[in-house]
Image: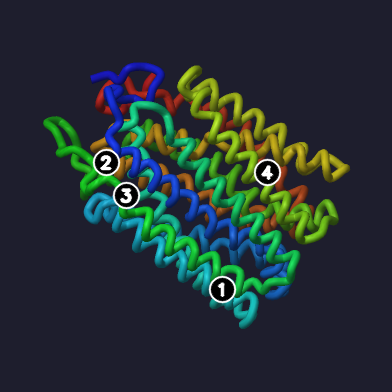
Amino acid sequence: MTPPPGAAGTLRPPTVPARVLAARNGVAVVFGLNGLALASWFSRVPAARDALELSPGRLGLLLLAISAGSLLAFPTAGSVAHRLGPARTVAGASALAAAGVALAGVAAGSWHAVPVVAVGLLALGYGSGTCEVAMNVEAAAVERRLGRTVMPRFHAAWSLGTVVGAIAGAGSARVGLSVGVHLCLAAAAMLAGTLVAVRSFLPAPTVPPTGAGSTPARGGGALAAWREPRTLLIGLLVLVLAFTEGTANDWLALAFVDGHQLTEALGALAFGVFVAAMTVGRTVGTVALDRWGRVPVLLGTMLLAVIGAATAVLASPWPVAMAGVVLWGLGASLGFPVGMSAAADQEDRAAARVSVVAAIGYTSFLAGPPLVGLLGDRVGILRGLLIVPLLLLPALLLVPAVRRPTDRSAGPTG
């Protein structure tokens, strides 16, 4: 059955049950706390770099551990979420991520042990990657039951969590709080809040039984998703958009400190401005998506990101560069959530397809840190960020892949 145009791709329910509203709130909290944990680490990257005495290239290789952990998680995350349910998967993955961010903080700030930091970041990436798939599957299920586009607002909650994390990071740097103490406190807050929030998730399993002619989400279903052209194209688009977002997460604070000669606190503020702009874009973007559709909105926001990233790098007065960061954040805001919604258009295939798209998209986090780090060794971190607009422009050709499918096969649409 073809979904009616303009909403979330499903029939609108006459009323929204309280159970669904509670699940909506729980999912938003989980997204926010996941963003808090990651931003807590990213906001203290300059301090960790100084404590560990790393060059840009070596720092890029260290940051690679987060992406490696995420990529190790994705091949099994869809199956785990399908078998255990999103609630149990998110709880376990968050516990691992919390342990990882705490270990990375203590190892960087107190032990000055690069290998131990790498282990902590690997655990953070694995836990965060597994949580990423499970919470997006749950978010897609909630979105369908609400009958309207809300996925970007869940990702806005993630961005809001990163804003809080960035502000806490800037404040911690300002008052001289050690990296280890700061990240241990952030890890404890994230884990405690997540364990409470997952209790309101929809009962598992969240997907209906597989109907005739449908492909099961287990086993071969995940392999079948890797052979679907539309799923692969969405994955490639998410890869570029994740690189656009992830490069700012990894390098923006350091680029403003080294390239624009700002203080560490102002560097952390630049990161906070970016994630604040993303939060605004994801909050108001749902209205634009329901009114104009995925393709035109995504084309416009990607062009905005091109202008913003170039301005953030090339503008001489740092306040103008900060305005470019605003545009960059607004432009990068909708790509990842729209890609996840598109991958989950068909509910009984959502876990497999979200897992595939996430795996492809997170490849950018594997290649991004060392790529920008190596560029930074040659032209400086700030100039190295020009790789972002250079990749965004050709990626505009991939945007039509996110159109809603016209049949249950979720094949390519015109």
Residue beneath disc 4: 387
Q: Is residue 80 left or right of residue 292?
A: left
**Rendered position, 125 above or below 399:** below
Marks 2 and 3, the one that precedes in the sequence? 3
Residue 200 circle label: 3
The alpha-carbon separation of the residues under discs 1 and 3 comes to 34 Å
- Kind of residue sitting beneath label 2: Ala
> Element under label 2?
helix
- Kind of residue sitting beneath label 3: Ser
Q: Nearer the viewer, residue 187 or 351?
A: 187
Q: Residues within 10 Å of mark 3 (few under 14, many from 20)?
A: some
Check contact, mark 2 vs mark 3: CB within 8 A. Answer: no
Which of the two discs, 1 and 4, sits closer to the camera?
Answer: 1
Marks 1 and 3, the one that precedes in the sequence? 1
Residue 224 circle label: 2
> Element under label 4?
helix
Which of the two discs, 1 and 3, sits closer to the camera?
Answer: 3
- Kind of residue sitting beneath label 4: Ile
Q: Residue at (76%, 38%) from the top-left corner?
A: 323
Tell me where residue 310 appears, x and y as whole percent. 74, 37
Tell me where residue 281 appears, x and y as whole percent. 59, 34
How many numbered discs sit on the rendered protein?
A: 4
The alpha-carbon separation of the residues under discs 1 and 4 comes to 27 Å
Residue 117 circle label: 1
**Rendered position, 171 above or below 276:** below
